[in-house]
Image (tube, rainbow, N blue to C red):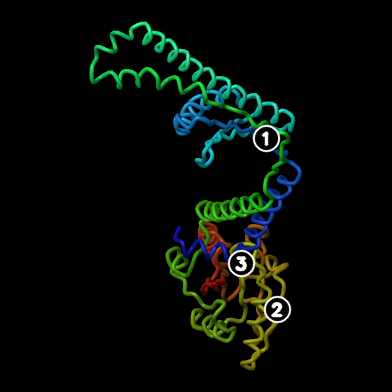
């Protein structure tokens, strides 16, 4: 199915497509208002700093972030989600933890607990580094004579021992979460989602309908099924239709059967045709096809020099249409674009051939 054909079907069934889009949009909107529970988010902060200024804040935050990854993974679960990220670099860097759950107090408790755990573990890391530095200082004092013998390397050796002692000033403080903010799902987002889903369902439904039913897409489809001429349509006037019927029948028929392929109401077409016949000075009328099966074989005209038009129903609903087509001087089959299936159109033509009707041509009702 081409894009042009898809657009044609969408134009034909735009009311159904619009109903699907509106239903999906309103449904998602109602779900966002009633069915989507609010999410409570609480934020706690771990502040890492070194008042002495001897340890870079980037080094402190590297430790906090490494610990934070493990804490976030272990704290998440049972309806709670914990995420963390470092704030913009300042003199003291911050690591922000956010806990989200369906309960406000639970979010606050989880966020604070995770922040304290990160701070405590970071303090433990630097306390161990400080202890190691003090141990190395004692070793330096015990081996002072050895370091004096190092010559030019003495200063570097001392620095390598003394520097770790600066970790003693590192601090990791926690700014606890005091409240949790409710963040429900955005109504606008759900409406947009419903609109997109509705459009996709409409397009897929129309495409599937076209693939399964194989409706008549244009005059080429009619020409591919039969060699009957297209006598008229939406663009042609009823006068042109009457003239083409006479050309196709090679005479002036006294009785004309107008037959739909599907459930199309052909009475308006019949009335326009009667008006066109009367415009030529001939008598014309519309009659119901009821009881024709009991009439004798032959023309169905009510009187001489009069043209009778029979608007029939579908051959699937009643046999009156077939009897009328059999006894009429000319039969015209109506085909509605995008509504009537090609397979059904071919079946109607087969039934008319079996009935021995004189099919003059086709009226193509395009959109």
Which residue is identified by label 2? 286
Label 1–label 3 contact, CB within 8 A: no
Q: Residues within 10 Å of mark 2 (few under 14, many from 20)?
A: some
Residue at the image point whose x is 54% and y is 39% from the top: 87
The residue pinned by badge 3 equals: 260
The vertical placement of 18 against 95, above or below, is: below
**C-alpha span from label 3 to label 2:** 16 Å
Badge 1 density bin: few <14, some 14–19, many ≥20, Cα 10 Å: many
Above or below residue 57? Residue 160 is above
> Disc 1 or 3, which lies upstream in sequence?
1
Name which quarter of the figure residue 103 lies in: top right
Residue that badge 1 annotates: 42
* Position in image of residue 12 (x %, y %): 59, 65
Say if 183 sits above or below 153 in the image.
below
- Tell me the element at label 3: strand
| Element marked by disc 2 | strand
**What residue is at 59 percent from the left and 83 percent from the top?**
238
**Which residue is situated farthest in the bottom direction here?**
281
- SS class, disc 1: strand
């Amino acid at each position: 199915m081409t894009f042009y054909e898809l657009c044609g079907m969408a134009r034909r069934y735009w009311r159904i497509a619009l109903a699907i889009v509106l239903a999906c949009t309103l449904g998602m909107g109602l779900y966002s208002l009633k069915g989507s529970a609010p999410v409570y988010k609480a934020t706690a902060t771990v502040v890492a700093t070194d008042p002495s200024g001897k340890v870079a804040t980037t080094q402190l935050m590297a430790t906090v972030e490494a610990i934070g990854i493990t804490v976030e993974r272990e704290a998440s679960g049972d309806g709670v989600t914990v995420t963390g990220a470092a704030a913009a670099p300042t003199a003291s860097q911050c690591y922000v933890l956010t806990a989200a759950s369906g309960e406000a107090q639970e979010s606050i408790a989880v966020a604070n607990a995770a922040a304290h755990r990160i701070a405590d573990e970071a303090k433990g890391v630097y306390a161990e580094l400080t202890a190691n530095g003090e141990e190395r200082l004692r070793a330096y004092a015990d081996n002072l004579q050895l370091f004096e013998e190092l010559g030019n390397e003495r200063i570097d050796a001392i620095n390598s021992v003394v520097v770790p002692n600066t970790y003693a000033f590192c601090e990791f403080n926690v700014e606890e979460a005091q409240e949790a903010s409710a963040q429900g799902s955005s109504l606008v987002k759900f409406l947009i989602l419903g609109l997109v889903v509705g459009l996709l369902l409409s397009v897929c439904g129309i495409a599937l309908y076209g693939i399964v039913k194989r409706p008549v897409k244009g005059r080429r489809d009619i020409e591919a099924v039969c060699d009957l001429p297209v006598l008229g349509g939406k663009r042609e006037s009823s006068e042109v239709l009457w003239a083409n019927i006479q050309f196709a029948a090679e005479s002036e028929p006294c009785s004309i059967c107008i037959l739909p392929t599907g459930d199309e109401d052909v009475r308006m077409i019949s009335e326009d045709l009667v008006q066109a016949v009367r415009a030529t000075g001939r008598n014309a009328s519309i009659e119901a096809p009821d009881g024709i099966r009991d009439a004798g074989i032959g023309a169905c005209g009510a009187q001489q020099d009069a043209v009778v038009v029979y608007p029939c129903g579908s051959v699937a609903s009643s046999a009156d249409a077939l009897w009328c087509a059999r006894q009429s001087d000319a039969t015209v089959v109506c085909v509605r674009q995008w509504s009537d299936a090609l397979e059904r159109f071919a079946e109607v033509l087969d039934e008319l051939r079996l009935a021995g009707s004189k099919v003059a041509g086709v009226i193509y009702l395009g959109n």
